[in-house]
Image (spheres, coloured by chain):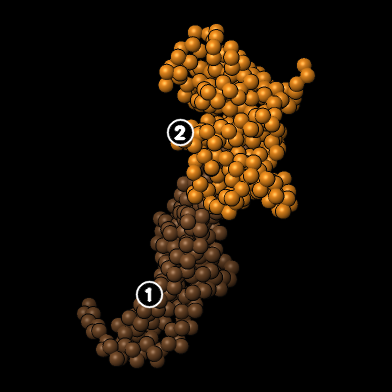
Chain colours: A orange, B brown
Amino acid sequence: MDTKEMIKINQLNKSFGDLHVLKGIDMTVYESDVVCLIGASGSGKSTLLRCLNFLEKKDNGDIIIKGKEVDPSTDNLNKIREKVGMVFQHFNLFPHKTVLENIIEAPIMVKGVAKEEAISKAKQLLSKVGLEDKLDVYPNKLSGGQKQRVAIARALAMEPEIMLFDEPTSALDPELVGEVLTTMKELADEGMTMVIVTHEMDFAKEVADWIVYMHDGKIVERGNPEQFFSNPKEERTQEFLKTTILK
Amino acid sequence: MERKEVATLPSFSHFIQTLIETKSVFLKAMLLTIELTVVSILIGIVIGLFFALLKISKIKVLEFISDAYVYLVRGTPLIVQIFILYFGISGIFLLPDFWAASLALALHNGAYISEILRGSIQAVDKGQMEAGRSLGMTKVLTLRRIILPQAFRRALPPLGNQFIIGLKDSSLAAFISMNELFNVATTLGSNNFDEMTYLLIVAIYYLVLVALLTFVVNRFESKLAVSDR
């Protein structure tokens, strides 16, 4: 095996009260992999993603990040989260801070990066996502697509090795989806390890290395995009693809 | 029982004349009212923030302490609290009048401020905490840098309201012989057998103070609202 295992999970279980959301998930994500998690709402894909940076606490099972098993009760989760960036469906930008301040906050406060250095890095990231002119603008002056690109830049400012995307385009107007997906595709092309919960099948088909289809808290099928979309093995997957493609 | 004499309104010229003549004594009293108000509000904010954080700590014991404090303060009249601190605590250790009054007012304001802050902290979208945590920020750091600034902004209108109430409540310090505005007005009024004139004068002073306080709070609000523009 020449590629590094970035994330490995064994028999992950998670319940919310009586609701068993994740039922023994096994998954491995290798370096530079782009994994798209797809499935109907309530299938557990967002919960799985949130378990990967410990925003949700697992009930049992192992989560191994870069070869090291993480024990949330003893390990410093903040250190791990520095390496695992996250982009949310609803952006979650800090509304009382400008675009620039949003991006430099964590590098300065968490990593102790010097302010000038953080700013120049932020400018670099903003031009990468095509928003270098929005430096001093407050988030509420941005479109949804712009907000999400700032959120991506903010996560990248911590120089993560893994990026998690939780339905990054689901809250966007249709005409704004493209700009965010373009940014994500560029990131994938640069070799970022990415786990993406998405409903954008065309994007998944084009960018993903692996598609993971979840249903009812379990992984039903996984495969590379060609095989997965053109020749799904499981009946459930065929059903799902039929309904989503009809949409 | 003797029938209360009906006070008549003073003539306008008499009112103006008395207003001018008494200005130095009232200004001095106003200073004390301002001191009582500012000190009790500032301490009240610290107390309020402390108990609001206890309340959102999700630790049962701390929540209970916060609940108990709010209940005790809201469940008893301010004048009772002032007297307890003045007569009760002063008997145990010497508490200067000013601090007995300030502390009673601060403890009182603190309970209401804690409820205001708790509400506004909880009103901040929980995605903000998640965003902070996902960037590797600790809970405390996220609270301090991300949640509280937003919460304070939301809290400002109700806080301003509470500050005004606090300002007017400081008049109750008159009952522990603080020579603040209300005390001076009633003393001068009865000494001169001219209560109504002095009550009207003191009302003017309070109105001016409330106008000033409102102005300051509004300025602060528009300054903080910069990210809404």
Give the label on residue B137, or none: none
- The local crowd at label 1, few if under 14, some if 14 to 19, many if 20 or more residues have their Cα within 10 Å, is few
Judged from this view, the residue extending furthest toward the right is A2
| Number of numbered callouts drawn | 2
Disc 1 secondary structure class = helix
What's the residue at 60%, 43% (across, down)? A130
- Of badges 2 and 1, nearer the viewer stands 2
Disc 2 secondary structure class = helix
Q: Which residue is mark 1?
A: B207
Is A28 placed above or below B171 here?
above
Give residue A173's quadrant in the image: top left
Is residue B7 toward the left or the right of residue A37 in the image? left
What type is the residue that disc 1 sits on?
Leu
Assign the N terminus of chain B to one quadrant of the image: bottom left
Q: Say which of A42 and B53 sits in front.
A: A42
* Any part of residue B131 in sight: no
Pinpoint the chain carrying mark 2.
Answer: A
Q: Residue B208 location, x and y as percent?
A: 40, 76
Q: Residue A155 location, x and y as percent?
A: 63, 39
Is B53 placed above or below A67 here?
below
What type is the residue that disc 2 sits on?
Pro
Is B164 placed above or below B187 here?
above
Label 2, label 1: how far apart the Cα atoms are: 55 Å
What's the residue at 51%, 26% (across, down)? A200
What's the residue at 55%, 25% (across, down)? A203
Q: Which residue is mark 2?
A: A174
